[in-house]
Amino acid sequence: MVDFIRRDKNDIYSKKILGFLFKNQKFLFIFRVIVAGLFFYAIFLGFYEPSKENTFTTALFWSIFWPLFMVVTLPTFGRIFCGICPHGFLGKYITRIGLKKKMPKWMQNRNIGILLLVIGWWGVYYVFPGIYRTPLGTALLFTVMTLLAFGLYFLYRDMSYCKYICPIGTLTRAYAKLSFTWLGTYQSACSECRTFECATACPYNLKPFTFDKRNSMTDCTLCMECSHACEAISFKIKKPSFSLFSRFQIEKAEVWAYLLILASIPIAMAFHHGIGRSNAAGEMIWSKTAGIFQSLFGPGGDWVGLFAFLYAMLFTILAGTIGMYLASKILKRPFKEVFYSLGYSYAPLFILSSLGHALSSFFTGGYERIVEGFAWAFGFSVNVEPLARRGDDWLMIFSAFKWIGIAWALLLLYKRMKLIKAEKLRKILAFPFAASLIIFFLGVNMYRNHIIDTYGRASGGHGHMHRSGKMFQTVPPKKATILQTGPRRESCAVCGMKLAMFYKTNHAAESDGKVRQYCSLHCLAADKTINKRSLSELKVVDTASLKFINADQAFYVVGSRKKGTMSRVSKYAFAKREDAERFRRQFGGKIVDFDTALKIAERDFEKNSFVAKPEDTLFFTTRNPAAKTRGGMGMRHGGMHRSGRQNAVPSASLWLAGKSPARPKCVRNVEGVFYLLNADGRRGKPRISKKNGCTKVSFAVPKSGYYPLYYVRSNQGLVNIAKYEYKRIDHSGEEVFTKAVVAPKTLKEIPIDLQRLKDHEDSFYSRLHSGEKVRFRVLKDGRPLEKARVTLQTQFGWQKTVRTDKNGIAEFQLINDYDPEWKKFNKRFREKYLVVATYDKGTQRYKISYSGFYLPARERYQSYAYALLIFLGLSVVIGVGVFAYRYRVQKPFREVSFDE
Amino acid sequence: MNKIRDAINRIDLRKFRFWIQLFFFVLFVYGAYFSIDLGRELPIFSCGYNRETGGTCYFLALQHQLARPWDRLFSTASIGVLTGFLTFLAWFIIFNKAWCGYACPLGTLQDWITSFRKMLKIPYGTYSQSQYKVLKKIKYIFLFIVIVFPLLLGIGLLDGEWRGAFCKMCPGRLITPLFSGDVSQWTIDFSTNTAIFLTTFGLGFTVLFFVGSFIKKRFFCFFCPMSAMHYIFSDWALFKLRKDGEKCTKCGDCYNVCDMQIKDIADDVTSKNILRDDCIFCMKCVAACPEEDALHVDILNMKVFTSTKGGFAKRMEIDSFKKEESDEK
């Protein structure tokens, strides 16, 4: 025994705060008592209050202990979860008074614990989801586990329960190998030791003084008993997973723990919860197998979950073993040696991907659940908001953990491959095969992302609408009445959303002898007022009975607190007045009849769109005027969209709009013709689509350059044209700018054309800035037009009218009327302008509009003078400084001499 | 064959380097006049803000590519990022860090400033070893800014003003365009606080570049994140700077000529690969080494330029000394 030791720098015990946390006997005891208290209190509450009211029991076990504390501490500090586990803490005392028998050989099998976890917990979890999620289920589970643990502690010595039977015993032992902490000893002291206090103190009957030599901490649970017995015990910070870089005694069960837990958590979750929640879920093999079994045996538990789990298991084991088998053949070593030695490289896969998931769910919901659970259990009231919303951009940072895990696994594989005795070339060849499970894991992740990107989430495109659970409107598909026929009968006739998902707001109507069913009154109104479809036999779902009733007789509760479908103002219909009254009392709103409700629904469109008269000035915008929010990421691509595939031709979208350039509104009526010119001068094909009263024009933009788009309406005595020149820039820099890019183009169908002359543009990136001169040319049937009236109007209302000269040219200076206070100034502000040229020839009138934008001039926010001043100033200061320094250094040392 | 080898080993490295550097300087600063464009993945500070550049520094493209939203960055749409990186790697592994010592326009400019100082007969400065250890770490901070800041931008933790933050801070953005008569980068951007900070930092760094490289040889290269980036991949490069420790007498000639003050070149007699993160692969050490084969430059394990007694004697003009001596006699 040693009383004093000079500790190394990286020893946690030499640190003040950390040393206290990990070593102080009293603190650890109190801490363990608190944890055990919480543990038993939560079990007690689970029986006492089994209803949903009890948020504490589930929060403690499923929000703190398992996903958060365990997953966060295992790859960092190691098995400290075991160190504070109430079972182990109390088990130590129970064993002391127990029978101290030796555990029988058949029970000394770590696979018992692993199988308990994988089948008893995860298998059950997938077949009967939610069984452990209730407070009662949780309490029952932990009561059984506690009784079993205490019984075994009483019977057998050396805490054998922790080593072999505890479902997470082997798991924590295996994953703690990644941690950056290491319990070892100071060899200088141990080499002279003959008393071995550390080994006697260890309740697990381990020999801490051998840990360093064995390069394995074996079953150590960091209970720190040994460190109280002898000072020579160290608890050091080392390189993460350093012990896996060299040899140690291999424990086969650990490799199986890595493999089976990887299968039952991340992979089965990716199958069941990732891909299973996409629209392609039904096509997957586990869904199909489940379908067969369900038709044979009827609905029991969750067949899909069961088979997702079983297939995950099968694929994972196959991917691991087949790859390793091939690798062992290449390496010419026995399979068992290769598999169990290289299998340790699987360690980071599960734990890091779970770490990312646990952290992000802590921020989105876990934090709220934990605080609320504790508040309920201890009778104080708090109101907490989640720290983040699902879908927040910064949460993406947690998805990086998965990739770190994969990289780490590959590094471990490389390091462990070095330990195998084989030729270098064989090792290189065997590497990809040995990495088969890692590649499989990577593939499953990429496949899940691919499926969700391609097929979308099954909940429809409204990912943010409901944070958890179902929406109020949703009913199970079986309960929804579908009046429509045809292949798309389960989707809204207008927007295509799943009808069952929004069933409580469903409407239906007859048109041309066919029934059309809508997700909401909003879509019905769109069909009626915008698509101008004549509808009869209007029906609506009664929110109370879920049956279709005649809309005229329904009572609508409008503007209640329950969220609506497709509209900010919710509308729910009831057959009986008293149902509607009860709903209104509960959730607010007011009761109206169908016609009023329809009018309110039509207001959704009026806000964003209008019916244009023939003489109205129209123009195009690069973003949907009806869209609610402004673009998020700071960089706008001017409406350009590139589908996920590489090499796909990008397309641009423009919206036809009117009213003012500052506040455009969608044009509901399209009565003219669209013309498009491609950058190469050929004609393009614009696609027109209408949604919610807005007209979208989409077209492919394969090359960099200008794409003039025209919208031509001809009425008696008036030709009214809207023009937009879409510019595409390919940022790859592969295309060469030539003068042909900016050469003016026109079409023979356009009787009057307005061209912006781009003589000064010398690259694809040229933009207009305030203060610059901009020249427009008016063409009539391809010839310059003199004396046409041209008006330029800026977003902030400044306008100027000139007449074209004999070359058909009108010149403007773009004025500087964007002048916010300094803090709000945005140098990328796109000030919109609208140029309108009109020309009368007899009674015939020609009108063309051209819209665009310009940026603030660089001189408005950049200063040469200051730059020069700072440059000169700094140069002088630094120059003089250097000179002074050198002068001082160079000055010879003068001896002080006394004149005697 | 031996004659050719001998001729190479006796080369006047100073002249050779001057002409190569001049060639690359013209190529990378004025390349566009000859309609040369070597792409945007070059492993040197050949700044893309210079409109006449013959090829662009990889950091400009890299920072823009990494700043994509993460869901797009980690999708197949970003294969271009990967191919860009592989192109960079392909450029780099050909010449290893010789890009710094021979091709980088900013490096060349520093060498010219050094020659100018020599003409004025002002002595150069050096760092003490403790200063040196601290200063050489700064380049990794800049590398962090180059790689991690755009990633933070991609998840919205930094605002758009930080787009290409390192370029705003880099003296190359201000200096290189000057050679094509473009002073438009010499401004302070007052539009936001971030912009003020970044442009002022860039200007201050430019001042340091001029003053520093006037006094200290290759002053800027100590802070160059490209040099740090090079070092990560330098093991894979075709060019290798190797040392035979047994033949080394630790005379220190190599250390004395080293612009980057790398002490290992003279001190380390154990490692074979003597390339360090600060090295610019100027090969002055090989030329200055008086021991036969102690230092050599290899391509794929084939010695192309080695230190020889003969070469050393020629460069030191020992023969002419002897001649003079004998003449005096």
Image (cartoon, grey):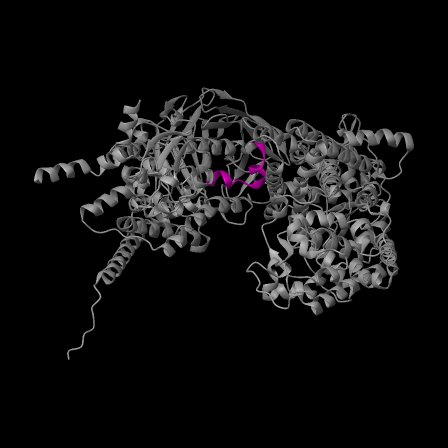
Q: Is residue B125 above or below residue B100?
A: below
Q: Is residue A421 above or below residue A134?
A: above
For this orientation, the residue located farthest to the left is B328
Quadrant in the rendering for residue A900: bottom left
Q: Is residue A295 above or below residue A50?
A: above
* Residue A826 visible, this angle: no
Q: Quadrant of the N terminus of chain A?
A: bottom right
Q: Does the segment drawn in magenta span residue A426? A: no
Query: In the image, residue A478 lies at what x, y percent?
Result: 85, 36
Query: In the image, residue B101 lies at what x, y percent?
Result: 33, 38
Q: Is residue A358 left or right of residue B327?
A: right
Q: Please state which of residues A743 and B224 is positioned toward the viewer in this rendering.
A: B224
Quadrant in the rendering for residue A372: bottom right
Q: Please state which of residues B259 and A243 is positioned toward the viewer in this rendering.
A: A243
Q: Is residue A385 left or right of residue B188?
A: right
For this orientation, the residue located farthest to the right is A297
Q: Please state which of residues A565 and A432 is positioned toward the viewer in this rendering.
A: A432
Total numbered labels: 0
Query: In the image, residue B41 lies at what x, y percent?
Result: 43, 34
* Residue A484 visible, this angle: yes
Q: Please state which of residues B63 and A411 is positioned toward the viewer in this rendering.
A: A411
* Magenta range: B63-76
Query: In the image, residue A472 lies at what x, y percent?
Result: 78, 46
Decide whether the magenta segment is chiefly helix, strand or loop. helix
Q: Does the segment drawn in magenta span residue B67? A: yes
